[in-house]
Image (tube, coloured by chain):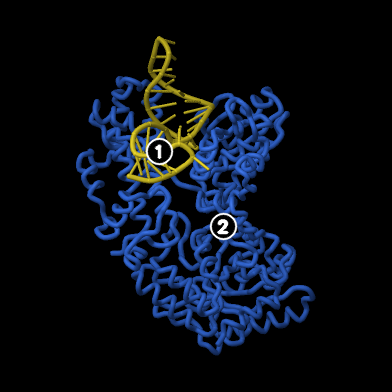
Chain colours: A blue, B yellow
Amino acid sequence: MPVHNADIARIFEEIAELLELEDANPFRVRAYRNAARVVGEQRFELAERLAKEGALPKLPGIGEDLSAKIQEIAATGTCALRERLAKRAPAGITELLHLPGLGPKRVRALNRELDVHSLSQLVRAAKDGRLRALAGFGAKTEKRLLDAALAQLGTTRRFKLAVAGEYARSLVAHLEKTRGLQNVVVAGSYRRMKETVGDLDILVTVSSPTAAQAVMRRFAGYGEVKKVLAQGETRASAVLASGLQVDLRVVPRESAGAALHYFTGSKAHNIALRRMAQAKGLKINEYGVFRGERRIAGDTEESVYGVFGLPWIPPELREDQGEIEAAGQGALPKLVRLEDLKGDLHAHTKATDGRNTLEEMAEAAQARGLAYLAITEHSRRVTVAHGLDPARLARQVAAIDALNARLKTFTLLKGIEVDILEDGSLDLPDAALAPLDLVIGAVHSSFKLSRARQTERILAAMDSPFLSILAHPSGRLIEAREPYDVDMLSIVRKAKARGIALELNAHPERLDLSDVHCRMAKDEGVPVCVDSDAHSVGDFDNLRYGIGQARRGWLEKDDVLNTRSLAALRKFLARGRF
DNA sequence: GCCGTTTTCGGCCCGACTGTTTTCAGTCG
């Protein structure tokens, strides 16, 4: 049973929680939390690296002890410390820690005084009015915890970036009508273009304290607000009807840059920068950068970075994943932009499960400033989508040829999204694929194969002389379906050897490749194509989220296949065939 | 538990809000 980084990270997180409940040294707790994060963010599997090279590379915040624990987990699947801690603690007690409003101190009190160590016990104790009797607890706390525990049954979910975007735009439009308001920005993980966001962090700049009050009132009065969780003079939190939490922060103009930086995060990036400040005898908070009492920066984000002699770092990179070092060396990537895209290589029409015609799709793509669009229907195996057989594909090819003859400054490419069958063969014969401009291979079935078989299947498909692009390489659906178990590094390396590009499918439910795997592809020199997988003319909007993810993966214009001119693209497509 | 231009011990990011407190602890982001 292979041990993944996520497994190691989970064990470290559990250790952190259990230690916290024992009132251990908080810095020791933090060390485990930090290790969980660092391990979870690695682009290669630590266990594999260990097996191959016998040692781990130096990772930040992981010293002798944690390194030994990683080796232990890689070898045994668990860790003696965790087992020991778990044995001492009441089963299930860590679930209480995940409840908003409960931290280690209160969980300990609940356990010690009331013998409460699970959500259901908490609900019972709260209903009996036993919580309010505890020191530091009151009637309000009891009610809040009861509500939170009951809500926990409907599991706390994150929102897909595109969905959060819809809510964010409406709320921003509502707030922008406030008198005296200067600027509204959605910061947080939304600004960093993370694939999902847990809440919206909205930052408002105002010209006066009166305006600040007005913004707070307008926020609380927003029609979508279901419940105000907290409201002070500069800060408020609310839950929208959708269940999305929104945190609002109002700041004066001179602090706008420091506040924007602070609330954009990530937390890890901010901590790294604050440590640098500390080393220079400075202090960073959301109001600015300070030397003693004196404020030396903070009106813009540039000024904050400037204090450290760093250039401005794009939000998508702010994960403490080497971006600060790169900035220091003048080696930040020049990230790809939406306007760099010259075409889109994955789209469907009414012929299968799309909603628009060839003409309508071509027109819409051209209206977005694109010069080419590949039509890539499903193949016959995908019966629910009415996938194409060779005869229907041939008819579509003829229709595209006819349409291209009429189009002046735009080109439709003839393609297919052909299914990769369970044995690694393709769903259409070579004779059907040969006349096409490009062939995208995709897995749409048998998701549960073992890692070895799944990897073998995809590698085999990549041996086809016709395959140009591997679609949505992990197969995950965000918050809905796990990626299939596959050795991505082997796939990336095979792509390199075979001249195949990997798709970053920009559909909001996919965003697949992930940011981490984009960076892996870049490191290995494999081009990524950012495709909409459009099923209707409106779906080209999704390219912006694909670009956001590509930027999180450090991709530059030259790393993205469909930033190339049509001529250069054709050269790439021809090269893959031998 | 980690780490080092304060270097092998003694630090470790910072502030707002709430509720229960009469001055602050706990939690959160």
Task: Tell me, yes or no, if residue A432 can be seen here.
Answer: yes
The quadrant holding residue A184 is top right
Q: Name the residue located 55 percent from the left edge and 68 percent from the top edge.
A: A503
Mark 2 nearby-residue class (10 Å; few <14, some 14–19, many ≥20) = many
Left or right for A322, reference A61: right
Res. A549 mark: 2
Image position of A563 with respect to A292: above or below:
below
- The amino acid on which the numbered mark 1 sits, given as a three-letter code, is Ala
For the image shown, how many numbered marks are present on the structure? 2
The chain holding disc 1 is A
Left or right position of A225 against A364? left
Q: Nearer the viewer, residue A159 or A290?
A: A290
Earlier-in-chain disc, 2 versus 1: 1
Q: Is residue A335 left or right of residue A134?
A: right
Give the residue pinned by disc 1. A151
Chain to which the residue tagged by mark 2 belongs: A
What's the residue at 39%, 25% (across, down)?
A: A141
**Where on the picture, by quarter, is residue A131?**
top left
Residue B29: x and y, percent? 50, 37
